[in-house]
Amino acid sequence: MTQRVKQLIAESRSAMISTEEQLLLHPYMEALEKKGLGKGKLPLFTVQQHYVMKYNVMGVEVARDRAASPNANDFMSEVVHNLRAASDALDHFGESLGLSTEMLYKGEPLSGAIAYSMYVYWLASKRTTAEFAAAFLVGMPSWGANCIRVGRALQANYGFAKKDIAFFDTFSIVSPDLEKVGLEVIAEGLDHGVDTVLIRRSVRLLLRYELMFWDTMWERSRS
């Protein structure tokens, strides 16, 4: 069954190769690497990520609490733990920009930026754990790769210390243990009748919403 799941994930990723390429070659990251965005544009990213992280945590907590198997509970619990750590690190990044917690909460969310987190919330709290796990496993590599690029650019071009950009390091890799449990969760879902069409759909939509986030950051950062 695990091999069947790995094949399904590989096919889902292959179907989204064009979107993944757009993510990995996104002009927002390229602009940061060339110091093409002013430091004053960085609070925009931080405020939007504040909302993204908030709703991601809320959604995954609901999914954890309604997990139908030990594997699903373990998977969602680990994702919640990682998201909380990332959220704390984001607050520290905000402080390095002079943003207080109150300022983050008062910042206005942009629809194109938080659409990703709205989908994550819906997927985690209303759909099957198998659908969420598949979208997570396929979507995290591109998100993690872009976060690494942003973190390096912030250090090299904008003078941030390593400790200030820990948020971007939290997504650097999906642990093999978490991936293993995620594959088992997907296998359980398939055994209980989750349609592969729904698995592929969750992957497609999450990656498209991920791209929408970066597109919004780029559009608003240039204006």
Image (cartoon, rainbow, N blue to C red):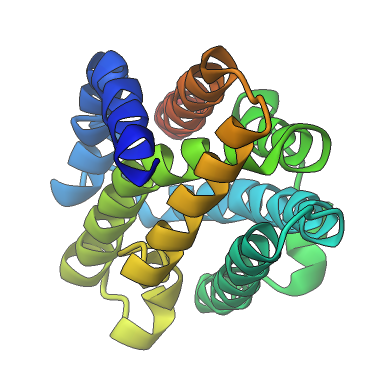
Q: Using residue 193 as the reference point, say whether residue 214 is left or right of it.
A: left
Q: Residue at x 41, y 77 (%)?
A: 166
Percent from the top left, x then y, of residue 141? 31, 47
Q: In this view of the protein, can residue 147 be seen by the observer?
A: yes
Q: 186 or 116, which lies in front?
A: 186
Q: 138 or 32, which lies in front?
A: 138
Q: Which quarter of the picture shows residue 21?
A: top left
Q: Residue at x 60, y 18 (%)?
A: 195
Q: Using residue 117 as the reference point, say whether residue 43 is left or right of it.
A: left
Q: Using residue 77 as the reference point, say whether residue 145 is left or right of it.
A: left
| In the depicted structure, whether residue 114 falls above or below residue 102 | above
Q: Residue at x 31, y 18 (%)?
A: 16
The number of numbered badges drawn on the structure is 0
Percent from the top left, x then y, of residue 183? 44, 49
Q: Residue at x 38, y 87 (%)?
A: 163
Q: Which quarter of the picture shows residue 84?
A: bottom right
Percent from the top left, x then y, of residue 131? 60, 33
Q: Which quarter of the picture shows residue 158?
A: bottom left
* Location of the N terminus (image quadrant): top left
| In the depicted structure, whether residue 56 falls above or below residue 194 | below
| In the depicted structure, whether residue 22 falls above or below residue 140 | above
Q: In this view of the protein, can residue 131 be seen by the observer?
A: no
Q: 82 or 63, which lies in front?
A: 63
Percent from the top left, x then y, of residue 223? 47, 25
